[in-house]
Image: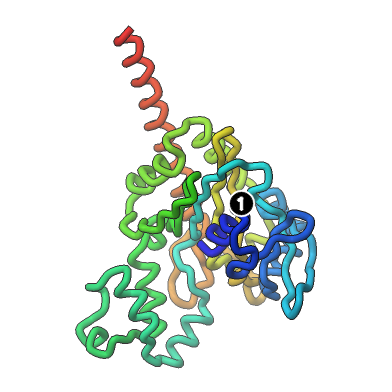
Amino acid sequence: MTYLYDIHCQHNDSLLSAGNFQLGEGGEVLKLYSEVEERCLDSLMRDMLRPFVPQYHGLVTRGEHCYIRLEDLLSGLRRPVIMDCKMGVRTFQVEELITARAKASMRSDMYQKMVNVDPSAPSAEEHAQKAVTKLRYLQWRDTTSSSSTLGFRIEGIMMDDGSIQRDFRNIRTLAQATEALLFFTRSHLDILKAYHSRLLALSEALKNSLFFRTHEVIGSSLLFVHDHSSKASVWMIDFGKTTPVPNMSQLLHDVPWAEGSREDGYLIGLTSLIASLGQAISVASWQQQDGCVGEKHVT
């Protein structure tokens, strides 16, 4: 959601330094430097996945900060509509889990985040302490969303009027995800088909990607972008938690995660999204045909 919100701000000539993003002099987007993300992007520029990630143009320094120079994914779009889908069955790193378990301190900030989403989620003891451990929060966050059931969750949608919708936490099933996709695209058949085609191409590229086989992809998103001209595309973004798998082993990405495993379930989420888009295309096609029949009947 940070990317979605900050880029929206920039394209509406508002806060140019909102969050971790700025606009570059050449029209590219500048993202606050992360060594992990920079290494990933550098590798991706030489991988099968290059057409599916924002183009990386090196580093630049502004004042005291270093930034990663990235392609502006909204260039050429008028009043873009954007959706951020967090991919995988878990959004925390194994190391985060180990650290959280070793340092089981109570966190009032995470308790508040939990209560804001679901006041009944904390136990009686946690309510009394008004705090939860980071381990408890990390596991709760993923298991109470479609991350656990579908392998992805919708972080937010920005419509063409700039309004941002974040309340998708109740989505648990493919049918509910399909409803969200129809809302996001306003049941526009060409846009739905463009997204479906792009994800099928991404699926093929992932099968042949050395980067994907050898990296644990955590906390990464698929960014869906379209406008009223029916231009539509999907991009892999956010690699700040994506790290190489130890000992040169390779991941499947399509099996559930179990503690001790490095599997992320990325392909579980991609398969769900492709299936959900297929369902949305069927619904939109039916709606279009039904509308035509209705018009003929009126005539």
Q: Amino acid at mark 1?
A: Trp
Most foreground residue, 199 or 133: 133
- Which residue does the image show at 20% across and 84% down from the upper left? 124
Answer with the quarter of the image where residue 151 lies: bottom left
In x, y percent, where is residue 98? 48, 85
In x, y percent, where is residue 257? 45, 68
Specify whether 277 is left or right of 7. Answer: left
Task: Determine the residue located farthest toward the top in the rendered image.
Answer: 299
Which residue is disc 1 drawn over?
235
Q: Is residue 215 visible?
A: no
Above/below status of 235 relative to 39? above
Q: Is residue 90 visible?
A: yes
Task: Determine the residue located farthest toward the left in the rendered image.
Answer: 124
Above/below status of 252 relative to 290? below
- Which residue does the image show at 43% across and 58% down from the upper left? 153
Task: Determine the residue located farthest toward the front in the rendered image.
Answer: 14
